[in-house]
Amino acid sequence: QVQLVESGGGLVQPGGSLRLSCAASGSIFSPYNLAWYRQAPGQARDLVAVISSGGSTNYADSVKGRFTISRDNAKNTVFLQMNDLKPEDTAVYYCNAKRIMIGVSYNYWGQGTQVTVSS
């Protein structure tokens, strides 16, 4: 079992930056693929960025060049650095940890943190 707790959300003006953190507890962190998703009101939950257990990263086209995902396995934490924020980035951001072990899928979510981009 993995518990995930996000932090770092808030209100920021367009063009500003925020750094989200997601702290994990309850299990060994390093084997998990980690991701950030976001969900705007009335919209589906969409993948923003993912970092594999080996450190490979991938991003949604809408955030490429502006957002950076990273992980610190020693601190059981995954980060999302968000720069040049736009109003369309406004959403609840969720941390996700996923792995498949012996044919069983393990998938965990945090409670979410609100990011609002507005002047």
Image (cartoon, rainbow, N blue to C red):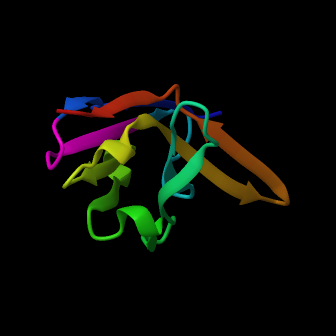
Instruction: Find the magenta span and give its range.
Output: 13-23
Q: Is residue 59 visible?
A: no
Left or right of 2 on screen, residue 17: left
Residue in view at x 44 percent, y 69 percent: 61
Residue in view at x 17 percent, y 32 percent: 119
Left or right of 38 on screen, residue 20: left
Residue in view at x 36 percent, y 46 percent: 89
Residue 16 falls inside the magenta stretch: yes
Residue 105 falls inside the magenta stretch: no
Task: Look at the picture and state if 76 lies above or below 118.
Answer: below
Residue 57 on image: x %, y %: 43, 70
> Toward the viewer: 107 or 37?
37
Point out the image quarter for the N terminus.
top right
Residue 68 on image: x %, y %: 30, 61
Task: Look at the picture and state if 110 lies above or below 64.
Answer: above
Residue 65 on image: x %, y %: 28, 70
